[in-house]
């Protein structure tokens, strides 16, 4: 018995990396899987190929599971609607969408082209909208559905050279939060995961010295794509029906729960504020709680299960 017995799951970006492991693990846990992958390069600049998605679907079928492949792009709403229709036609239902599909086009903001900005926003943020919009009415009608979307520490915390990626990934946080709020009465859940995993995305970062090369070798051994994939699959399970609107992280064998933006300081002036008094009084009163620009605050120590 698997945690997804009787469920149908759509996995985007399922031909490589975290998406591939999401599809394989969902199938091992009893789900029937629609494996979607455009089959394109990491930058998304080519036409793609049906090969990666079909290879994973074949692997699932060879292991005794049920899977079909789809090689359309998440950047198209009609294509996303086709993925949902394919799930309904092939397996008679759809209960969860796992959406790790993504590309990278990194660069410093002052050098970033409009094309590189648009491409990353289209795949990550528009793509998340498309797959959710394609499935939401079906989920609401059956009063059951789980979205598992993917954010990034590049958006939650920040990362130099990734303004396009960070903006898209932080936008997904807002999308997921409101989906969860609006879906609560219909048992439609939405959660996001910020993964740290050794995939072709992390491999694409340039190696500057031997110390960095050694860190990358350790990363390949300790932060595997199957680790966040297991969390994604778990969030689709019946036992996770009460879990929604959350931001999770997966870093090796550490599972993280992120805080969400809420006010941490309020300053009041009876006679109201002026620009001068804000500079002289309000900002200094708040300054000890400012987050640094150059480095994130350290994560809390892990609790063992």
Image: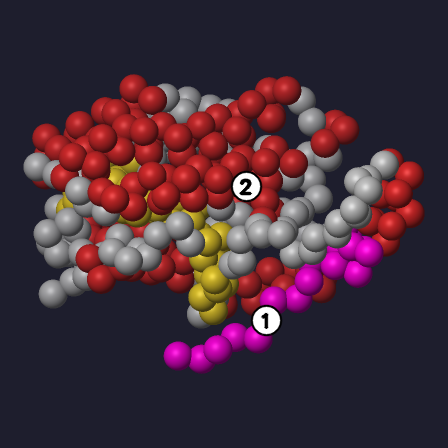
- Work out which residue is located at the far bottom of the displayed protein and give it: 304
Judged left or right of residue 209, residue 181 is left
Judged left or right of residue 214, residue 58 is left
Can residue 189 be seen here? The reply is yes
Q: Picture coordinates of residue 149 (x, y %)?
A: 39, 44
Q: Residue at x 36, y 44 (%)?
A: 180
Looking at the image, residue 180 lies above or below residue 249: above
Judged left or right of residue 67, residue 71 is right
Nearer the observer, 269 or 164: 269
Q: Secondary structure at mark 1?
A: loop
The image quarter containing residue 58 is: top left
Q: Picture coordinates of residue 185 (x, y %)?
A: 25, 44
Can residue 51 be seen here? The reply is no
Q: Which residue is mark 2?
A: 170
User: How would you rate the neighbour count of disc 2 (Cα within 10 Å): few for under 14, some for 14-19, many for 20 or more?
Assistant: many
Most frequent secondary structure within the magenta stretch: loop
Q: Residue at x 44, y 37 (%)?
A: 175
Q: Which residue is mark 1?
A: 300
Q: Quadrant of the C terminus?
A: bottom left
Nearer the observer, 273 or 80: 273
The image quarter containing residue 105 is: top right
Q: Residue at x 17, y 30 (%)?
A: 86
Q: Which residues are magenta?
A: 285-305
Q: Secondary structure at mark 2?
A: helix
- Work out which residue is located at the far front of the displayed protein and give it: 271
The answer to whether residue 289 is magenta is: yes
Q: Picture coordinates of residue 279 (x, y %)?
A: 88, 44
């Amino acid at each position: 018995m698997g945690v997804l017995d009787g469920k149908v799951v759509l996995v985007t970006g399922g031909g490589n990396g975290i998406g591939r492991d999401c599809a394989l693990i969902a199938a091992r846990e009893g789900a029937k899987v629609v494996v979607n992958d455009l089959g394109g390069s990491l930058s998304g600049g080519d036409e793609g190929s049906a090969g990666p998605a079909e290879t994973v679907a074949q692997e699932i079928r060879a292991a005794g599971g049920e899977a079909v492949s789809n090689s359309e792009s998440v950047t198209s709403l009609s294509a996303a609607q086709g993925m949902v229709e394919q799930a309904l036609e092939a397996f008679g239902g759809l209960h969860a969408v796992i959406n790790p599909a993504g590309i990278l086009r990194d660069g410093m903001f002052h050098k970033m082209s409009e094309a590189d900005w648009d491409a990353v926003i289209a795949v990550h943020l528009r793509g998340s909208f498309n797959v959710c919009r394609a499935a939401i009415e079906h989920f609401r009608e059956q009063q059951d559905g789980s979205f598992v979307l993917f954010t990034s520490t590049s958006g939650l915390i920040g990362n130099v050279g990734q303004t396009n990626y960070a903006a898209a990934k932080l936008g997904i946080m807002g999308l997921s939060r409101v989906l969860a709020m609006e879906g609560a009465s219909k048992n439609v859940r939405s959660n996001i995961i910020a993964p740290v995993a050794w995939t072709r995305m992390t491999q694409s970062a340039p190696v500057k010295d031997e110390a960095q090369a050694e860190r990358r070798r350790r990363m390949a051994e300790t932060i595997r794509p199957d680790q966040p994939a297991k969390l994604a699959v778990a969030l689709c399970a019946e036992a996770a029906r009460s879990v929604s609107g959350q931001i999770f992280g997966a870093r090796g064998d550490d599972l993280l729960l992120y805080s969400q933006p809420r006010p941490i300081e309020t300053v009041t002036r009876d006679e109201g504020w002026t620009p001068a008094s804000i500079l002289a009084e309000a900002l200094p009163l708040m300054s000890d709680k400012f987050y640094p620009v150059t480095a994130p605050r350290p994560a809390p120590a892990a609790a063992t299960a």
